[in-house]
Amino acid sequence: MKKVTGIGGILFKSKDPNAMNEWYKTHLGLETTPYGTSFEWRESEDPNKKGLTQWAPFSETTKYFEPSEKDFMINYRVDNLEALVEELKKENVTILDAIETYDYGKFIHILDLEGNKIQLWEPID
């Protein structure tokens, strides 16, 4: 089973997310919104399928990255989240919550070996 298929997003803490968005917009040309920006790309195996990678600054006081003490969280794209979660449970990986489904995909959070919170995302293409 192929597990991770790519990077879905880079999420990080910032003293002033709005100023950070504006700086990247002004100096590097990112088309930012209050949620950061999405980079659109095409899958190499099927160029008709689009993918997204999210870049998003969060407030430095966010609790969203807890229980990790790091200032960042990586979102990984996966193919079959339910099957992967079952496999991770058997491997005693710490799973922080239940799978949540939105109109743009399914999500769950886990911890890696050093306690970094990781977001797994099965996109709905």
Image (cartoon, rainbow, N blue to C red):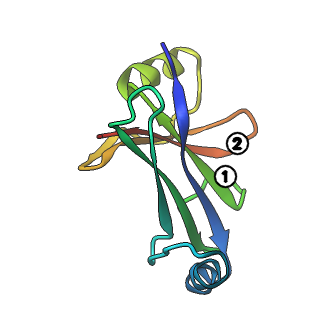
Q: x%, y% of residue 1?
A: 48, 12
Q: Residue at x 49, y 75 (%)?
A: 32
Q: x%, y% of residue 91?
A: 58, 16
Element type at marker 2? loop
Q: Residues within 10 Å of mark 2 (few under 14, many from 20)?
A: some
The three-letter amino acid code for the residue at tag 1 is Ser
Q: x%, y% of residue 68?
A: 66, 52
The three-letter amino acid code for the residue at tag 2 is Gly
Q: Nearer the viewer, residue 14 or 47?
A: 47
Is any part of residue 11 visible from this angle?
A: yes
> What label does residue 31 carry, if any?
none
Q: Nearer the viewer, residue 72 or 113?
A: 72
Q: Residue at x 52, y 23 (%)?
A: 3
Name the residue beneath numbered marker 2. 115
Label total for image: 2
Could you give the CA–CA distance between mark 2 and mark 1, rounded to whole angstroms? 6 Å
Placement of 93 over or under 74, stated as above or below: above
Is any part of residue 63 visible from this angle?
A: no
Placement of 55 over or under 59, stated as above or below: above
Q: Residue at x 70, y 62 (%)?
A: 71
Q: Residues within 10 Å of mark 1 (few under 14, many from 20)?
A: some
Element type at marker 1? loop
Q: Are marks 2 and 1 in contact (CB under 8 Å)?
A: yes
Placement of 65 over or under 41, stated as above or below: below
Name the residue beneath numbered marker 1. 68
